[in-house]
Amino acid sequence: MPRLLLASFQTVLLIGILVKVGCHGTSPLINLHDSAPFPDPPSVGAQSDRQGVFMVKNAKQAVNLKAKRHAQFFGPDSEWATSAKFLKKYYEKESLVQER
């Protein structure tokens, strides 16, 4: 009996999740009725540059955090920690290339 109750609960939960995901509408990518002026190309370029710098900074911070956690959990000489250090060096090198 408990097994049947658990299976029915899982079924109801799955149906609820599917309904929630299926009924979630998407917003239009371009609002054709918006009267706001389109931004000029220099401001779009500057915003793109700022976003790129922000993404590189966040990627570096995430890799640093992962490297520290891997070193704590598996030891500083483990393959996990070494791989994270190599990934950190790769991101740093790629960010320098992208900044040029």
Image (tube, helix red, strand yellow):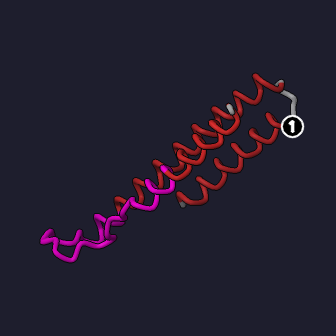
Q: For the N terminus, give its image quadrant.
A: top right
Q: Position of residue 4 (x, y in %)?
A: 67, 39
Residue at image coords 60%, 39%: 62
Question: Relative to 65, does residue 99 appear above or below in the rendering?
Answer: below
Q: Secondary structure at mark 1?
A: helix
Residue at image coords 64%, 47%: 92
Q: Position of residue 82 (x, y in %)?
A: 82, 37
Which residue in the rendered view is the most extreme toward the front? 1
Q: Position of residue 90 (x, y in %)?
A: 71, 50
76 displayed left or right of 31: right
Q: How many numbered markers are drawn?
A: 1
Report the front residue among 21 and 57: 21
**What residue is shown with label 1?**
79
Which residue in the rendered view is the most extreme toward the left? 35
Q: For the C terminus, give its image quadrant.
A: bottom right
Q: Is residue 60 covered in magenta?
A: no
Q: Is residue 30 covered in magenta?
A: yes
7 displayed left or right of 71: left
Question: Relative to 30, does residue 97 appear above or below in the rendering?
Answer: above
Report the front residue among 29 and 57: 29
Q: Residues within 10 Å of mark 1 (few under 14, many from 20)?
A: few
Residue at image coords 59%, 48%: 11
Instruction: Please identify the quarter of the rendering in which residue 88 is found.
Output: top right
Q: Position of residue 6 (x, y in %)?
A: 64, 37
- Where are the magenta residues, as a range? 16-45
